[in-house]
Image: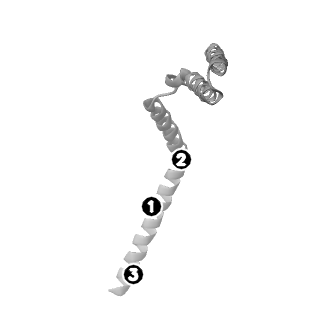
């Protein structure tokens, strides 16, 4: 990667010097800006395809979600027990009210 940056920089500097020696200063400035821009883009694009794929990122997210789900299993179980106890109390309360009304 460093070699690519050095080569791009050398080409940009050499091209800019040649442009300023051979061309009008305004046109040479444009050429220099374009050469530096192309050198930077080429350097940054060198590792364009080294990033992870969508599928790899989704697999990692799925793994993290599964770990989080498993960490919360005890809390979900406690909540389920509390909910069932609440429902049982509600049913008992409704049954008592139904007997008193009748």
Please give the name of the residue rendered at 58% of the width and 27% of the height, measured from the top-left corner.
Answer: 34
Name the element at disc 2.
loop
Above/below status of 99 relative to 45: below
Looking at the image, tell me whether mark 3 or mark 2 is earlier in sequence order. 2
Please give the name of the residue rendered at 54% of the width and 24% of the height, measured from the top-left corner.
Answer: 45
Q: Nearer the viewer, mark 3 or mark 2?
A: 2
Q: Position of residue 86 (x, y in %)?
A: 47, 66
Q: How is the image coloured?
A: one colour
> Which residue is denoted by mark 3 in the rendering?
97
> Which residue is denoted by mark 2 in the rendering?
72
> Which residue is denoted by mark 1 in the rendering?
84
- Asked if disc 3 and disc 2 are in contact, CB closer than 8 Å, the reply is no
Q: State the quadrant of the C terminus.
A: bottom left
- Within 10 Å of disc 3 (Cα), the crowding (few <14, some 14-19, many 20+) is few
Please give the name of the residue rendered at 61% of the width and 29% of the height, measured from the top-left corner.
Answer: 33
Rounded to the nearest whole Å, what is the CA distance between mark 3 and mark 2? 37 Å
Looking at the image, tell me whether mark 1 or mark 2 is earlier in sequence order. 2
């Amino acid at each position: 990667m460093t070699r690519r940056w050095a080569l791009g920089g050398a080409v940009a500097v050499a091209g800019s010097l040649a442009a300023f020696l051979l061309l009008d200063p305004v046109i040479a400035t444009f050429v220099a800006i374009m050469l530096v821009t192309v050198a930077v883009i080429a350097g940054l694009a060198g590792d364009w395809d080294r990033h992870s794929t969508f599928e790899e990122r989704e697999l990692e997210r799925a793994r993290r979600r599964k770990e989080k789900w498993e960490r919360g299993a005890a809390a979900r179980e406690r909540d389920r027990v509390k909910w069932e106890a609440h429902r049982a109390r509600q049913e008992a309360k409704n049954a008592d009210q139904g007997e008193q009304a009748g």
